[in-house]
Amino acid sequence: MANTDFRTIWLHPDDAAVVQIIDQRQLPHKYAVHDLNTWSDGVEAIADMYVRGAPLIGATAAWSLYLAAIHGKFPHEEVARAANALL
């Protein structure tokens, strides 16, 4: 793994409705990928420190808004609700 490049957040290669992150709580002892299926999963990932560091926290919030937009029956309202929760 020493010469392998990794992303810390990305879209699932087979499902653009799922965002994947490295669960940083497991590092350095274990490499674990966690799926974010809803914007509230992103809120949990930030609050429970699955992701760490300002840039990755910001990226997780942005991807959470993406999830709100694609999963919400009324995307504008869902994005607003997600944005308020992410604040």
Image (cartoon, grey):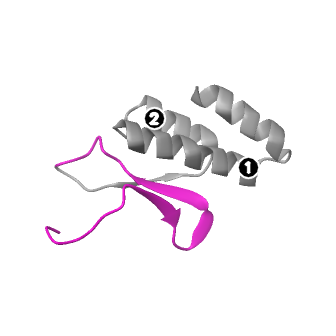
Q: Position of residue 28 (x, y in %)?
A: 17, 48
The disc label shown at residue 16, or none:
none
User: Magenta part of the protein: which range?
Assistant: 1-28
Instruction: Tell me the quarter of the picture where residue 51 sits.
Output: top left
* Real-space Cα separation, disc 2 to disc 1, in angstroms: 19 Å
What's the residue at 62%, 42% (across, down)?
39
Is 5 one of the magenta-colored residues? Answer: yes
What's the residue at 47%, 57% (across, down)?
20
Sort mark 2 into few (<14), some (14-19) or many (20+) by Cα contacts within 10 Å.
Answer: some
Q: Residue furthest front?
A: 55
Sort mark 1 into few (<14), some (14-19) or many (20+) by Cα contacts within 10 Å.
Answer: many
> What kind of residue is marked 2?
Ile
Instruction: Tell me the quarter of the picture where residue 87 sits.
Output: top right
Tell me: 52 left or right of 27. Answer: right
What's the residue at 54%, 40% (across, down)?
61
Q: Which residue is mark 2?
A: 46
Instruction: Label 1: state its secondary structure.
Output: helix
The disc label shown at residue 69, or none:
1
Tell me: 55 left or right of 40. Answer: left
The earlier-in-sequence mark between 2 and 1 is 2
Q: Nearer the viewer, residue 10 or 33?
A: 10
Q: Position of residue 32 (x, y in %)?
A: 32, 55
What's the residue at 26%, 56% (across, down)?
31
> What kind of residue is marked 1?
Ala
